[in-house]
Every structure is written in structure tokens, then in C-alpha cells.
């Protein structure tokens, strides 16, 4: 039997227990060796004791690690309970109204908003009407309030003053589920679960067939690369879709929104983090997705919004300009300067 097999001290991730176990073994050898040298202990007894002691080190370390994992689990469980017990900030009214369709327009009426713990308003008396079937582009410098504006629509936050209405009804009077069922969102950073591609596309919907999943993927220009995967639609994507490229993750999320078939679409810089080739694929998928829907598009790359029905320029929480691409260029104000800077 080799020496390493005899003592079988395995490497441990915890440096403290590793140090203590090796230190204890050295101490036993030093103390027992001195006893053997002065004749107070037989050498074979020392060897037997060392072997038994070495064999006990691994169970002792395992016990210490188990205690450490229990403590870590308790801390994690405490954090989970804190999250569960956190009061719901967005409250649904007891007599909330049902809303299953979108038929007319979205109206921002004197909307003001500031984040909790801050004093400066992110949006200031914002007034805007978005008509059914219209493609509205929102542009402006970073921090101007673009994302905050669209986050208020599905009630990720509630506006401090003013109101947002869908078809003349304040969104705070609607059932949350109905409101969010009307809105499909594609963001810059898509979220995927550590699950199969099919389950990520049908996320939240158990009544969807595989045929519907594949049809949605085709409309999102995702079917081709999915079929090249080792297990096709049953391929696991990893945490946050780490096994996929940025463009592939984005198209999976677009397929999810296609399957949802919401009448209102929010695109929050959906292509800004992609390379040119991936952006082209995703842009084609978005163009397909936007057909027949009311679309609100936030973009830093102004070339992607030039064909919008209307462009709104926001600065410091206020609407500075509004019109078509050609109209805003003729004015020669903020939008024209942004175009010039990008060119």
C-alpha cells in the first residue's frame, strides 16, 4: 500500500481545516517520535496510532464541512424569507378591472416619477399619446428617462403624479395579470432559465404545443440554429443562457414574445449589445414581430429607428422634440445633433 493511500488525506477547499488537519498530524508524529526515542513508546504502537489518527482526519473534516454548509444554508434560507416577506410595492386594487384587449391608444398624462430614496424627478410632467398600430421610437442621451418611461407601462413602478391610461382606463385600475398580458417586452439583457430551449420559449404557458413553439421560433429566425444544436429544442441553455451567443439568446426571447402574442410591444435597446451579424438576424426577427402591433422602441443606434411612424426625443425626463425622422432633421435641434454625433 502506498503512503498516500495509507493516510488518504484528501485536498479540501477550506484552507483552515486543511491546515489544522496537517498540523495535528505533524504534532502527533513529533510528540510520538520523541517518546519512541526516549524509550517510552514502541515504534509499532506509534505507527498504528498514526494510521488510525490519519484515518480519522477525513471524517473530522467532513463533519466540519457539514457544519459549515448547514450554517451557509441557514443564512441563505434567511435571505429567502426576507425576499418572500418583502411587502409587495405594486398593489392591485380589490375591485380591479379585467382588460383582455387593446383597441385604441396609450396616454401618458402629466406623468412624474422619482425613484425611492432620491429627490430628483426622472420624469417631469410627461405627456404622450401612442395610437394603436403605431411604431413609436424613443431616443435620447443615457439617463434621460427612456427606460423608466416604458417600465411604468407594465407597472414595474407606479408613477408619483399623473396617470397612464390604456383605452381610457388608468392602468392602476386594471388587474396586473391582464395588464402585463397585453405587453411583450424585449430588453437588452435577455433572461433565460437553466432549462431547455423549448421550455424557455413557452415560459409561463403550459398549454402550448411543440408545434406552436417551433412556429414561434421560425418567426423569430431561431429555428435554424436551434435545429443545429445537439438535442434541438431539448438542448439545455445553461444559467442565463450561457451556452448560447448573445444573438441566439435574444432570438429565443423574441420567440417567447411571439408566442405570447401581446398587442403592445416594448423593445428596450434590444440590439445594442450585439455584433453586426447578430444584430441583422435579431433586427429581421424584430421587424417580423412588430407587424400588426403597437410598438415602443428605445434605441441608441438611431439608424434602427429612422423608419418609425414617430420619434420622441427625451432629455432629463422631458419631451424635447416629436415628429418623423425627416421632420426632426429639418428642425436641426437635438435629434439632428444626435444623428450627427453618430455619423
Image (tube, rainbow, N blue to C red):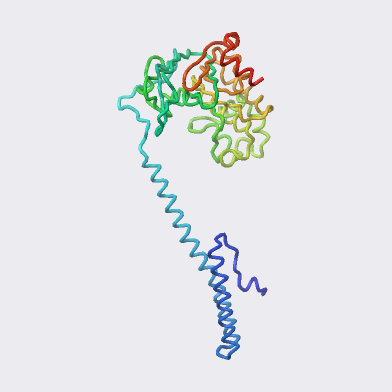
- State the image coordinates of residue 333 (x, y, percent, origin top left): 57, 13
Q: State which quadrant residue 172 falls in.
A: top left
Q: Which residue is painted at 67% across and 19% down in the image? A: 343
Q: Is residue 335 left or right of residue 183?
A: right
Q: State which quadrant residue 163 falls in.
A: top left
Q: Which residue is painted at 66% across and 37% down in the image? A: 229
Q: Measured along the vertical axis of the image, is residue 134 above or below residue 17?
A: above
Question: Residue pushed farthest bottom?
Answer: 39
Most foreground residue, 6 or 40: 40
Q: State which quadrant residue 111 falls in.
A: top left
Most foreground residue, 32 or 3: 32
Q: Is residue 258 visible?
A: no
Most foreground residue, 114 or 264: 114
- State the image coordinates of residue 216 (x, y, percent, origin top left): 58, 26
Q: Is residue 18 visible?
A: yes
Q: Which residue is painted at 48% across and 61% down in the image? A: 66
Numbered disc total: 0
- State the image coordinates of residue 196 (x, y, percent, origin top left): 57, 38
Q: Which residue is painted at 43% across and 52% down in the image? A: 75
Most foreground residue, 189 or 117: 117
Q: Quadrant of the N terminus?
A: bottom right
- State the image coordinates of residue 154 (x, y, percent, origin top left): 44, 25
Q: Measured along the vertical axis of the image, is residue 232 above or below residue 185?
A: below
Question: Residue pushed farthest left?
Answer: 94
Amino acid at each position: 500500500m502506498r503512503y498516500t493511500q495509507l493516510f488518504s488525506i484528501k485536498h479540501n477547499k477550506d484552507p483552515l481545516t486543511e491546515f489544522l488537519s496537517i498540523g495535528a498530524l505533524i504534532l502527533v508524529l513529533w510528540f510520538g517520535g520523541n517518546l519512541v526515542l526516549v524509550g517510552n513508546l514502541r515504534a509499532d504502537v506509534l505507527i498504528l496510532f498514526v494510521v488510525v489518527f490519519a484515518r480519522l482526519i477525513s471524517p473530522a473534516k467532513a463533519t466540519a464541512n457539514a457544519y459549515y454548509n448547514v450554517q451557509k444554508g441557514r443564512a441563505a434560507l434567511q435571505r429567502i424569507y426576507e425576499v418572500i416577506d418583502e411587502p409587495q410595492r405594486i398593489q392591485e386594487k380589490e375591485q380591479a378591472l379585467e382588460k383582455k384587449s387593446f383597441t385604441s391608444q396609450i396616454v401618458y398624462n402629466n406623468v412624474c416619477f422619482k425613484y425611492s430614496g432620491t429627490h430628483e424627478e426622472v420624469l417631469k410632467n410627461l405627456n404622450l399619446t401612442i395610437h394603436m398600430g403605431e411604431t413609436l421610437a424613443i431616443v435620447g442621451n443615457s439617463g434621460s428617462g427612456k427606460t423608466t418611461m416604458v417600465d411604468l407601462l407594465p407597472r414595474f413602478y407606479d408613477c408619483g403624479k399623473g396617470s397612464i391610461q390604456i383605452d381610457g382606463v388608468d392602468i392602476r385600475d386594471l388587474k396586473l395579470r391582464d395588464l402585463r398580458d397585453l405587453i411583450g417586452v424585449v430588453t437588452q439583457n435577455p433572461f433565460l432559465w437553466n432549462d431547455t430551449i423549448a421550455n424557455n420559449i413557452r415560459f409561463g404557458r403550459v398549454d402550448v404545443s411543440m408545434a406552436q413553439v417551433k412556429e414561434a421560433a421560425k418567426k423569430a429566425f431561431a429555428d435554424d440554429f436551434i435545429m443545429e444544436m445537439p438535442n434541438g429544442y431539448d438542448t439545455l441553455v445553461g444559467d442565463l443562457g450561457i451556452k448560447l451567443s448573445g444573438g441566439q439568446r435574444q432570438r429565443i426571447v423574441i420567440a417567447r414574445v411571439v408566442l405570447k402574442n401581446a398587442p403592445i410591444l416594448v423593445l428596450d435597446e434590444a440590439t445594442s449589445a450585439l455584433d453586426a451579424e447578430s444584430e441583422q438576424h435579431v433586427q429581421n426577427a424584430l421587424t417580423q414581430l412588430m407587424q400588426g402591433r403597437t410598438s415602443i422602441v428605445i434605441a441608441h443606434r438611431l439608424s434602427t429607428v429612422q423608419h418609425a411612424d414617430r420619434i420622441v426625443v427625451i432629455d432629463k425626463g422631458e419631451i424635447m422634440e416629436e415628429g418623423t425622422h425627416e421632420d426632426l432633421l429639418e428642425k436641426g435641434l437635438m435629434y439632428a445633433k444626435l444623428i450627427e454625433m453618430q455619423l
